[in-house]
Amino acid sequence: MPSSPPQALLLVDGYNVIGAWSDLKQTRDRHGLEEARRELLHSLMDYSSYHSFDTHVVFDAQYQDTPGSREVITSYLCICYTDYRQTADSYIEKTCALFRNDPRKLSQRLIVATSDRAQQLTVVGYGAEWMSAQKLQTEVELMFARVRRQHRTTHRQQKQSTSRFLASGLDPAAQQRLADLRFGKDRKKS
């Protein structure tokens, strides 16, 4: 787990989001569902870490005869596969119902990301915040843009700090000559 408590528990309806994000839909159609899941998880891994969210991406396993499972990806992200005959919606609703009586709700937000209208009404009824799949995509894209901007600014500042002296703009031979003069070394005498 992260060193400080997460700011929010984010529950993501995985297949709903894959179906709502155009780039993930294209990946799913071209390369399969597994690749679309991988891309979604990669995006959410960075987003969750940036915002200090404990993110659970929920995938239906209702058509597979397997028990539910949880796979921890990072300290900020895990995948939850539902039990046989359980939908992601019912898993999310149950988690919201349990969170309603959890003492963490006093210090932590509960956010559900899905574009399912019925799911939206249910989770809000439990006191959770709702975010559409499109809003989540916008938030992820803004986070990536912010990180790129910070990286460019930091890089530019580092470059400026190394080149703020006039001597740093000189060729190495001229820099050496200045250093010799500064330390009282005269090449003619040596």
Image (cartoon, helix red, strand yellow):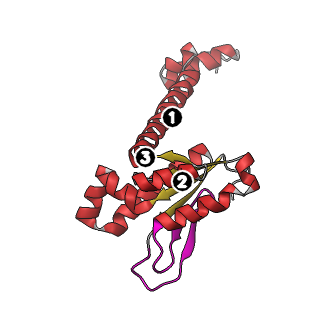
Disc 2 residue crowd, few under 14, some 14–19, many 20+, Cα 10 Å = many
- Asked which secondary structure carries label 1, the reply is helix
Residue 113 in sight here: no
Comparing 46 with 95, the one in front is: 95
Which label number is shown at residue 151?
1
Q: Amino acid at mark 1?
A: His
Q: Which mark is residue 123?
A: 2
Residue 37 lies within the magenta run: no
Local packing at callout 1 (Cα closer than 10 Å; few below 14, some 14-19, many 20+) is few
Q: Nearer the viewer, residue 47 or 175?
A: 47
For label 3, the SS is loop
Q: What range is drawn magenta here?
A: 61-88
Q: Amino acid at mark 2?
A: Val
Q: Nearer the viewer, mark 3 or mark 2?
A: 2
187, above or below 58, in the image: above
Q: Given this view, does label 2 or label 1 mark the residue nearer the observer? A: 2
Task: Say whether disc 2 or disc 1 marks the residue closer to the N-terminus.
Answer: 2
**Precedes in sequence: disc 3 or disc 2:** 2
Residue in view at x 55 percent, y 25 percent: 157
Looking at the image, residue 1 sits to the left or right of residue 124; the answer is: right
Residue that lies at the very extreme toward the right in this rendered image: 103
* Image position, residue 187 (x, y; %): 60, 18
Query: In the drawing, what numbered circle is on residue 132?
Result: 3
Circles 3 and 2 in contact, beta carbons < 8 Å: no
Query: Which x, y percent locates residue 114?
Result: 44, 53
The quadrant holding residue 160 is: top right
Asked whether 101 or 88 is in front, the reply is 101
Q: Amino acid at mark 3?
A: Ser
Percent from the top left, x then y, of residue 1?
69, 59
Q: Residue at x 64, y 14 (%)?
A: 181
Asked if the residue under mark 1 is in contact with the one under mark 2, i.e. CB atoms within 8 Å, the reply is: no
Query: Relative to residue 16, is residue 109 depicted above or below?
Result: above
